[in-house]
């Protein structure tokens, strides 16, 4: 069975102003279809968080990196993706330890993932995590992406470890529920029903309201398959 790819920001979504998109559109879409839009929310929250810090002057050590970052964001909004990627690459090389440099690596990993270049994406996500970015949401998102890559490459144990790390790193219940949902779904898609049932039982009492119906459905399906 084919594994459903992780929801990522599309080019159309990337060009929009993150503040306007978050306030006017994404939250309402998330309430209607949380599983489809939560990946986009993770990225938008990260962008908003970074822009807030930079605009309030809390990060003063890397003004050139800051300027380059806003240039890259402007290029994304104009759908000039190749130019934006080049600037992100420059930031990651020139300022690897700045907040912008670390997030640039994460964005570059996402671009590679969207292009289904999983080898490059894996290298970049791992590079991002190795820099200890202290950004729980992006760290969790990186671990989820690495888990999907591991599952696609047949490294099931590695993928399971990554998803548990994503759940552990995520500070919010709804995001934890999303990653738990993805965990069970990936195992079911691989027909690892016993393991899926174990993970379901491990996390089902911690699931937010948005995902409870899905976990009830999963539980019913798995009990039928396992003849419990």
Image (spheres, rainbow, N blue to C red):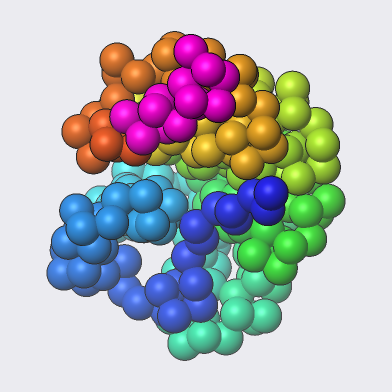
Residue 206 vs 5, above or below: the answer is above
92 to the left or right of 6 = right
Q: Nearer the viewer, residue 51 or 11?
A: 11
Q: Residue at x 66, y 27 (%)?
A: 192
66 to the left or right of 102 = left
Q: Measured from the top left, where is residue 115 in percent x and y?
A: 71, 68
167 to the left or right of 52 = right
Q: Residue at x 78, y 53 (%)?
A: 118
Q: Measured from the top left, where is residue 79 in percent x and y?
A: 52, 85
Residue 217 vs 227, above or below: the answer is below
Residue 226 image-quadrant placement: top right
Residue 132 image-quadrant placement: top right
- Residue 128 appears in the picture as rendered: no
203 to the left or right of 10 = left
Number of labels in the image equals 0
Q: Nearer the viewer, residue 183 or 103?
A: 183
Q: Residue at x 54, y 68 (%)?
A: 68
Q: Measured from the top left, where is residue 64 in percent x and y?
A: 54, 62
Q: Measured from the top left, where is residue 73 in percent x and y?
A: 47, 72
Q: Main secondary structure of the magenta part?
A: helix
Q: Is residue 220 magenta?
A: yes
Q: Nearer the viewer, residue 79 or 30?
A: 30
Q: Is residue 19 magenta?
A: no
Q: Which residues are magenta?
A: 216-228
- Residue 1 appears in the picture as rendered: yes
Q: Residue at x 70, y 72 (%)?
A: 86
Q: Nearer the viewer, residue 158 or 46?
A: 158
């Amino acid at each position: 069975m084919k594994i459903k790819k992780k929801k990522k920001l599309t080019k159309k979504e990337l060009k929009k102003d993150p503040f306007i998109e978050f306030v006017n559109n994404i939250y309402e879409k998330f309430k209607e279809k949380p599983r489809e839009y939560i990946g986009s929310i993770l990225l938008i929250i990260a962008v908003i968080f970074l822009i807030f810090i930079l605009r309030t002057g809390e990060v003063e050590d890397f003004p050139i990196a800051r300027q380059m970052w806003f240039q890259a964001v402007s290029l994304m909004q104009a759908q000039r993706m190749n130019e934006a990627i080049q600037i992100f690459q420059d930031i990651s090389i020139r300022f690897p330890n700045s907040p912008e440099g670390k997030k640039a690596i994460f964005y570059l990993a996402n671009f590679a993932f969207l292009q289904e270049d999983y080898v490059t994406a894996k290298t970049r996500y791992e590079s991002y995590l190795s820099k200890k970015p202290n950004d729980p949401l992006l760290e969790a998102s990186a671990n989820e992406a690495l888990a999907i890559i591991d599952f696609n490459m047949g490294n099931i144990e590695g993928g399971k470890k990554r998803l548990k790390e994503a759940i552990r790193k995520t500070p919010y219940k709804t995001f934890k529920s999303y990653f738990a949902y993805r965990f069970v779904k990936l195992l079911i898609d691989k027909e690892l029903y016993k393991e899926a049932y174990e993970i379901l039982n491990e996390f089902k009492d911690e699931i937010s309201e948005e995902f409870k119906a899905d976990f009830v459905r999963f539980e019913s399906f798995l009990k039928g398959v396992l003849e419990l």
